[in-house]
Amino acid sequence: MKDWNILLVDDEEEFVQTLCERLDLRGLACRVALDGEAGLKMMDEAEPDVVVLDMFMPGLKGLEVLKLIRQRHPKVQVILLTGQGATKDGMDGMKLGAFDYMIKPLSIDDLTAKIAEAVKTARA
């Protein structure tokens, strides 16, 4: 098991739990938050290396959460998850300081590789 700290923030419970299980099978421990407020609270308790953040959630939207993460946890790297056709939203997130964005549905191998890059940047 790698010592990377990953936080997944997504309101689609089945999707995010399955994603966490698939990352765990690859030796990556992760925690799950089902909305932005819960994710921020979890980050205040234990800062992760990387946050994988859904753009569209009830309550705080992904870009709002990203702005708060940049203010409170500037070293944490954020990978945004967007839906099909939402490339502009991902680009907007990059302008706000996201590490990168990925479009759902996504390959677990591609996400794992992107997380590895983000961890390397977070720990540089």
Image (cartoon, helix red, strand yellow):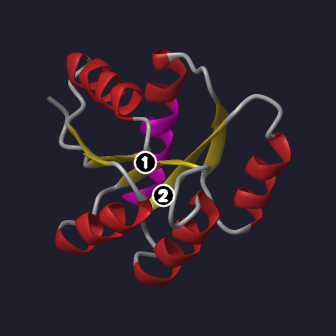
Residue sitting at the far front: 58
Residue indicated by mark 2: 77
In this picture, residue 56 sits left or right of residue 87: left
Q: Which residues are magenta?
A: 114-123
Q: Amino acid at mark 2?
A: Gln
Q: Which badge, 2 or 1, is on the more N-terminal residue?
A: 2
Per the image, label 1 sits on a secondary structure element best described as helix
Instruction: Describe residue 32's horizontal placement relative to residue 109 as left or right.
Output: left
Q: Which residue is mark 1?
A: 120
- Looking at the rendering, in which quadrant would you find the C terminus? bottom left
What kind of secondary structure does the magenta stretch mostly adopt? helix
When asked about the image quadrant of residue 1, the answer is top left
* Position of residue 24 measured from the top left corner of the image (x, y, whole percent): 22, 24
Question: Quadrant location of residue 19?
Answer: top left
When the figure is inspected, residue 60 is found, relative to residue 99, above or below; the finding is below
Q: What's the residue at 69%, 33% (across, down)? A: 83
